[in-house]
Every structure is written in C-alpha cells, then in structure tokens.
Image (cartoon, rainbow, N blue to C red):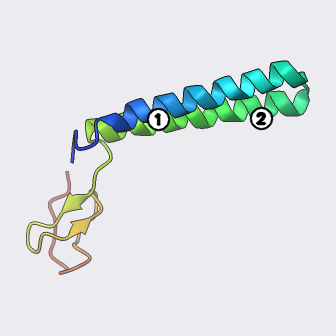
Amino acid sequence: MVGEHPAVRATTVIIVVAGLALAVALGVGRGFDATAVTILVSIVLVGAVAIAVANRAERGAIAPGRCDSCGGVVSARAPYCKHCGARRAVP
C-alpha cells in the first residue's frame, strides 16, 4: 500500500494552500473581524491535520493489516481476524 498514490500528499498540500490563500484574500478584501480570524485559524489547523495525515499515509503508517489465515483486511492492531477468528501476531 505504501507509495500506491504518490500524488496524494502533493494534492493535499495544493488544496490546503489554495484554501488558505482564498481565505486570506477574502479576509483582506472584506476586512478581518473576530469571526474571520476564527475561521482562518480553523482552516490552518484543519489543513495542518490533513497534511500530517497525508504524510503518515504516504509513509505507510496508516494502513490496514491482513490476516495470515484468510487474507481478510483487518485493523493493523486487531488481535483476532474479524472474518475467520484467527489469532493475529500484533506488532
């Protein structure tokens, strides 16, 4: 799964930067008040989280696990397979 979608991080950064630029441009054009600043800070925080998640996904830190017995997709930290009930070796 690692590296399957190499453009995800770049696309995420482009969208976040474009949204931030649009918010700043609208704020400058219409004037910043308390609500505008709050929304701008929210956009920055959500953008930072989106970029962090994209980075982790690109490195493979966020990926599903596979059951050794049946090959089903399970949580990476699941102690048992939800499909066949087999015990999994959890790292």
Which is more foreground, mark 1 or mark 2?
A: 1
Asked where in the image residue 44 lies, by quadrant, the reply is top right
What's the CA distance linking mark 1 and mark 2?
A: 19 Å
Q: What amino acid is found at the position of numbered circle 1 in the picture?
A: Thr
Q: Look at the picture and state if 7 lies above or below 75.
A: above
**Residue labelled with disc 1:** 12
Asked where in the image residue 57 lies, by quadrant, the reply is top left
Q: Residue furthest left?
A: 69
What secondary structure is marked by label 2?
helix
Q: Look at the picture and state if 77 lies above or below 10.
A: below
Q: Is residue 85 left or right of residue 25?
A: left
Q: Earlier in the sequence, mark 1 or mark 2?
A: 1
What secondary structure is marked by label 1?
helix
Q: What amino acid is found at the position of numbered circle 2 in the picture?
A: Ile
Other residues around mark 2 within 10 Å, as few (<14) / some (14–19) / many (≥20): few
Residue 62: which numbered mark, if any? none
Q: Position of residue 23 (x, y in %)?
A: 73, 28
Q: Is residue 60 left or right of residue 11?
A: left
The answer to whether residue 56 is seen in the rendering is yes
Residue at x 26%, y 66% (from the top left corner): 74
Residue at x 15%, y 67% (from the top left corner): 67
Residue at x 80%, y 32% (from the top left corner): 38
The answer to whether residue 79 is seen in the rendering is no
Q: Nearer the viewer, residue 8 or 35?
A: 8
Number of marks in picture = 2
**Residue labelled with disc 2:** 39
Q: Position of residue 28 (x, y in %)?
A: 82, 18
Q: Position of residue 88 (x, y in %)?
A: 16, 65
